[in-house]
């Protein structure tokens, strides 16, 4: 009887531990998945950068003086206006605007074929690479920005 | 104490190494030549010109800290270093040229004329005469580089505000416009009368067309002809990855040097020059497939340089200081490439093009190198890392040549040791 009781308590304890452990495992797995996901996003972002952006903005994100603006250290790139960044990637850019006090002459290519997740990945890569330390960009932020972009075009 | 001695010797060693490294201002030159820093940190020095008395004028791309965009430099004690430096003019630009007692300078849309006194001081720094205005400035390729013939005619580059005259500039899949409407008002060399004020397009003449962007132009006084160096198109691989690999784009198209006669057409945007096929090839925006040969009506270059190196100035050498082979040959400054990425960049040097009996031999060689300041001959990965980028060229009255840099604003003086 005593043993039975004890067994029951042990069982309860075991059950409890299992529950706690499994909760932690689940959390841990989510964390790993999230980290892995982020790493995958970053790899994907880097790949897009290398195929589409590097030629003008260069491997170190430093751009070309007077022609193609730097992304590394750029106030706009690290700024809060995600909508503007998404629009520039999607529509291209060709306006006489001072960027951190300098002017650049080349027109930027539009990327009408880049999907929402790809725009999020490449923006996240650009905002966290070299000396840049801005936040990641989510797919929902890109979706919202593209919705505004579409509305603005109509 | 020991540590202190060690420290001091390290400092002395580093200092000596610095001096050794800075011999010839860090440049590599052919035997017998030497270089020194004539000036430094004057601002984004584009083209330069030198008066008969040796005063150097530099045109800045943007006004410097003092708000000046033309800098007058004088070496009063003849030690090869400018010691009297001052500036004027508020507008950025590229072109500058001394003709007799007049100094001509260009903004990105106009050409102005100043008068010089007997000491080559500017008489009207605040009130120049407007010679030409209203030239197209649509940001891309907006530098209005200028030169003169033996008379009073100005030749000015009006660069095409486009990469390849696509319906939408630098847009993948966008077709080339036929005919290219840009060529009516840009993409060529225009000729104006240097003595007449207030001219615009209707007063000038399109002297040559089909030139995407010309920073370097000079009159060959021996043969009485204009020579221009064109910046070839960009991004063949970016927009046509099926036709051009990254490695092919790094070598295509050639930067081309032309002998120009009135009415010539160099073929932009319809063709580009392939230096390995030795042919003009139809641009992919106009139905080209990287092999289809372009029309014979377009001009052949006299020299084809490696792609994307960006020729910034041309200078025919008429001095007597350098060895005989340089006489009447052409120096060409190369700013250094960006569109060879992901491959290493090229250029960042001054080349020499030998001429024989008034014709380019087709050969060329590197004359002055090391402007980028890379250690042990490493290649420049990104142009923004180059310490200096060669831009303007001018010849001094003693036959030395001067090279300007538009990053920090150095001016190098290169002479020959007799």
Image (cartoon, coloured by chain):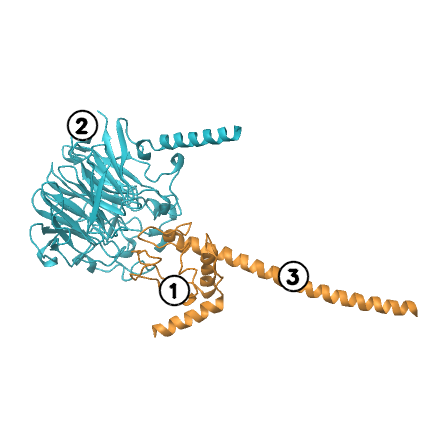
CB under 8 Å between callouts 2 and 1? no
Q: Quadrant of residue B239?
A: bottom left
Specify the subunit that label 1 lies on: A
Where is residue B323 shown, x and y percent of the image?
20, 27
Where is residue A148 shown, x and y percent of the image?
40, 72
Can residue B179 be seen? no
The span from disc 2 to disc 3 (Cα, nearest Å) is: 78 Å
Of residues B285 and A144, which is closer to you in this image?
A144
Q: Which of the chains is orange?
A: A
Of residues B92 and B80, which is closer to you in this image?
B80
Which of the labelled discs sits on residue A90, or is there none?
1
Which residue is located at x 34 percent, y 40 percent? B372
Q: Which of the chains is cyan?
A: B
Where is residue A36 shown, x and y percent of the image?
57, 58
Of residues B323 and A118, which is closer to you in this image?
B323
Which of the labelled discs sits on residue A28, or is there none?
3
Question: Which residue position is annotated with label 2?
Answer: B324
B194 sits to left or right of B24: left
B117 sits to left or right of B181: left
Badges 2 and 1, same chain: no
Considering every residue shown, the one lying at the far front of the view is B1
């Amino acid at each position: 009887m005593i043993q039975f009781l004890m067994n029951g308590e042990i069982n309860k304890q075991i059950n409890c531990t299992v529950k706690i452990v499994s909760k932690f495992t689940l959390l841990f797995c989510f964390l790993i998945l999230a980290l892995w996901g982020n790493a995958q996003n970053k790899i994907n972002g880097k790949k897009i950068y290398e195929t589409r952006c590097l030629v003008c903005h260069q491997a170190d994100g430093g751009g070309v003086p007077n022609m193609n603006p730097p992304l590394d250290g750029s106030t706009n790139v690290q700024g809060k206006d995600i909508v503007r960044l998404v629009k520039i990637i999607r529509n291209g850019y060709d306006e006489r605007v001072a960027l951190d006090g300098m002017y650049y002459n080349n027109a930027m290519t539009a990327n009408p074929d880049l999907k929402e997740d790809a725009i999020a990945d490449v923006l996240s890569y650009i905002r966290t690479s070299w000396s840049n330390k801005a936040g990641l960009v989510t797919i929902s932020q890109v979706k919202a920005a593209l919705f505004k972009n579409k509305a603005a075009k109509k | 104490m020991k540590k202190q001695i060690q420290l001091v010797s390290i400092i002395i060693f580093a200092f000596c190494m610095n001096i050794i490294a800075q011999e010839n201002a860090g440049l590599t030159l052919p035997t017998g030549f030497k270089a020194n820093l004539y000036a430094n940190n004057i601002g984004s020095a584009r083209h330069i010109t030198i008066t008969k008395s040796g005063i150097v004028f530099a045109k800045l791309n943007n006004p410097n800290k003092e708000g000046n965009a033309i800098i007058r430099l004088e070496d009063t004690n003849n030690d090869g270093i400018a010691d009297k430096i001052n500036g004027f003019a508020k507008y950025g630009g590229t072109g500058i040229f001394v003709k007799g007692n007049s100094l001509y300078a260009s903004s990105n849309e106009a050409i102005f004329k100043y008068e010089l006194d007997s000491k080559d001081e500017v008489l009207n720094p605040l009130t120049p005469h407007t010679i030409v205005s209203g030239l197209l400035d649509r940001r891309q390729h907006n530098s209005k580089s200028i030169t003169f013939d033996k008379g009073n005619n100005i030749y000015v580059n009006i660069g095409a505000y486009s990469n390849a005259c696509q319906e939408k500039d630098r847009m993948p899949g966008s077709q080339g416009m036929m005919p290219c409407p840009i060529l009516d008002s840009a993409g060529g060399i225009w000729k104006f009368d240097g003595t007449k004020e207030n001219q615009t397009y209707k007063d000038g003449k399109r002297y040559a067309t089909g030139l995407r962007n010309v920073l370097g132009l000079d009159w060959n006084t021996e043969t009485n002809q204009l020579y221009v160096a064109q910046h070839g198109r960009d991004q063949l691989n970016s927009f046509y990855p099926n036709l051009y690999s990254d490695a092919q784009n790094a070598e295509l198209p050639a930067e081309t040097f032309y002998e120009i006669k009135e009415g010539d057409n160099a073929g932009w945007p319809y063709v580009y020059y392939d230096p390995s096929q030795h042919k003009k090839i139809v641009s992919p925006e106009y139905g080209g497939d990287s092999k289809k040969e372009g029309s014979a009506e377009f001009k052949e270059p006299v020299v084809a340089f490696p792609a994307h190196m960006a020729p910034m100035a041309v200078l025919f050498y008429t001095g007597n200081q350098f060895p005989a082979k340089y006489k009447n040959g052409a120096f060409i400054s190369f700013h250094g490439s960006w569109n060879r990425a992901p491959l290493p960049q090229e250029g960042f040097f001054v080349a020499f093009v030998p001429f024989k009996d008034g014709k380019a031999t087709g050969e060329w060689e590197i004359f002055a190198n090391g402007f980028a300041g890379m250690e042990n001959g490493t290649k420049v990965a990104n142009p923004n890392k180059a310490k200096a980028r060669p831009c303007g060229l001018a010849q001094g009255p003693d036959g030395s040549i001067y090279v300007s840099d538009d990053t920090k604003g150095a001016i190098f003086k290169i002479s020959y040791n007799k």
